[in-house]
Image (cartoon, rainbow, N blue to C red):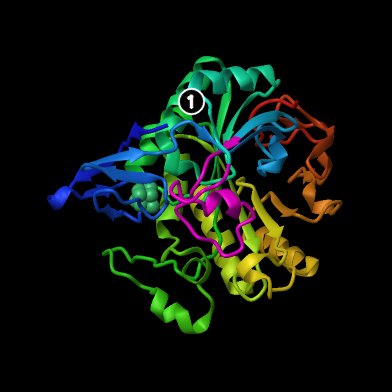
């Protein structure tokens, strides 16, 4: 369904500039933005995917992955078409790399009211915007999230985090959880106290890969980091981070240390960090699967930097898909894939030592 977009400005010559994400596309009349789903029609910008759902199903919240947010619950998961990144190894490329002018993917319209109704009918505790990038259909996500909150449902973005601050602020009051990728750190540009760059992506280019530049189609991780901090500090969202560790691209120990240190310093030591296994796919078919030992090293790096909850993902049965008490070491949540098999937290505390465990929402 066509819906006039938020966050755009009319420019000379019937062009529009979209301010939803840091691409800041300037779009000529009749054309689409980089994400392939926002179109300039006669000098006005429209979302062409309002309520246009390509995938919908009830998923375990652990699948997102969110491990410290309503564990054991089911979440109604929906996605549309398009994305504002072009990751060469995207698992959902059939929908994420689609443009509305060339997609043969079946979609159906689900109104925000129907979305909430289906969520409740399916016994889900909330809604997750996932599968493709939620930011690019923000108009729909805002309307759905507002209704969801009125019905006591939780709301989740599973996001690449490439969003402008004003856009995040528009959904901030209605969003409970923000599961964001930090895919790499090579493009990070730090500022000193005077605002001067002290590390540039060019300087880093020789020393290591820059994942965002090399694989995703964007130049810098900085807007993603800024948005994650804003989600937590301004909107009090529950934030979990995932890094898919790709051999030769983002697995050097210095880079993993940088990511983990940044999380501790900016989001806090209780922020869950998921380091997940990559398998060869699409444009990265030549890259081998991540050795489990690399993920174990990444987990140790996270712990060394001070993170209390670092999880290994995409390795079914690994001991580090479980949650352990940071204080006494007792296993508190036993997982088998996306299933919670045991839950040993009562009133937010470890049943063994009574340490407070940062989990949002009850079990199941
Ligand atoms: S949301 Fe789409 S059209 Fe808007 S700036 Fe981002 S990529 Fe461009």
Residue 162 lies, in percent from the top left, at: 44, 52
Task: Sort mark 1 into few (<14), some (14-19) or many (20+) by Cα contacts within 10 Å.
Answer: many
Q: Is residue 32 above or below residue 299?
A: above
Classified by dominant secondary structure, the portion drawn in magenta counts as loop
The image shows residue 175, relative to residue 233, as above or below, that is above
Q: Is residue 72 magenta?
A: no
Residue under label 1, please give it: 144
Q: Residue at x 65, y 23 (%)?
A: 125
Q: Write the residue at 56% across / 23% down.
A: 115
Rendering coords of residue 94 (x, y %) = 59, 52
Considering the image in quadrants, where does the C terminus appear?
A: top right
Q: Report the side of 21 relative to 125 (left or right).
A: left
Residue labelled 1 has its Cβ within 8 Å of some atom of ligand 1 = no
The vertical placement of 350 against 179, above or below, is: above
At 29% from the left edge and 47% from the top edge, which residue is drawn? 18
90 within the magenta span: yes
Residue extending farthest left:
12
Left or right relative to 175: residue 345:
right
Task: State the residue in front, 29 or 18.
Answer: 29
Q: Which residues are magenta?
A: 78-105
Image location (x, y in percent) of residue 217: 45, 64
Looking at the image, can residue 47 be seen?
yes
- Position of residue 217 relative to residue 172, above or below, is below
Quadrant in the picture for residue 293: bottom right
Closer-to-camera residue (225/164) = 164
The local secondary structure at tag 1 comes to: helix
* Residue positioned 67% across, 53% down in the render: 274
In the rendered view of the protein, which quadrant contains the N terminus?
top left
Query: For residue 198, which quarter of the picture?
Result: bottom left
Residue 11 visible in the shown view: no
Q: Nearer the viewer, residue 272 or 286?
A: 286
Q: Residue furthest bottom?
A: 206
């Amino acid at each position: 369904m066509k819906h006039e977009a938020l966050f755009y400005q009319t420019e000379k010559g019937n062009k529009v500039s979209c301010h939803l994400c840091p691409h800041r596309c300037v779009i000529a009349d009749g054309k689409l933005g980089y994400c392939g789903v926002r179109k300039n029609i006669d000098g006005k910008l429209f979302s062409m995917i309002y309520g246009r759902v390509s995938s919908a199903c009830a998923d375990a919240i652990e699948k997102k992955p969110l491990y410290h947010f309503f564990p054991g619950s089911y979440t109604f998961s929906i996605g549309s078409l398009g994305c504002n990144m072009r990751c060469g190894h995207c698992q959902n490329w059939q929908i994420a790399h689609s443009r509305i002018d060339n997609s043969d993917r079946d979609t159906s319209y689900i109104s925000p009211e129907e979305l909430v109704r289906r969520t409740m009918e399916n016994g889900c505790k909330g809604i997750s915007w996932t599968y493709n990038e939620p930011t690019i259909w923000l108009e729909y996500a805002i309307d759905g999230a507002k209704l969801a909150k009125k019905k006591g449902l939780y709301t989740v973005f599973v996001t690449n985090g490439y969003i402008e601050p004003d856009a995040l602020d528009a959904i901030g009051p209605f969003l409970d959880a923000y599961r964001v990728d930090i895919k790499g750190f090579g493009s990070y540009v730090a500022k000193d106290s005077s605002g001067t760059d002290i590390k540039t992506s060019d300087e880093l280019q020789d020393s290591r890969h820059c994942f965002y530049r090399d694989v995703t189609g964007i130049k810098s991780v900085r807007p993603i980091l800024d948005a994650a901090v804003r989600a937590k500090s301004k909107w009090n969202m529950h934030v979990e981070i995932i890094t898919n560790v790709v051999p030769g691209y983002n697995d050097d120990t210095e880079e993993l240390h940088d990511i983990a240190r940044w999380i501790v310093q900016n989001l806090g030591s209780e922020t869950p960090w998921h380091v997940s296994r990559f398998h060869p796919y699409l444009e990265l078919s030549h890259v081998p699967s991540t050795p489990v030992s690399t993920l174990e090293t990444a987990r140790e790096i996270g712990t060394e930097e001070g993170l209390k909850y670092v999880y290994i993902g995409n390795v079914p049965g690994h001991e580090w898909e479980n949650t352990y008490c940071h204080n006494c070491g007792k296993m508190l949540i036993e997982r088998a894939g996306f299933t919670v098999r045991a839950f040993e937290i009562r009133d937010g505390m470890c049943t063994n030592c009574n340490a407070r465990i940062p989990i949002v929402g009850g079990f199941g």
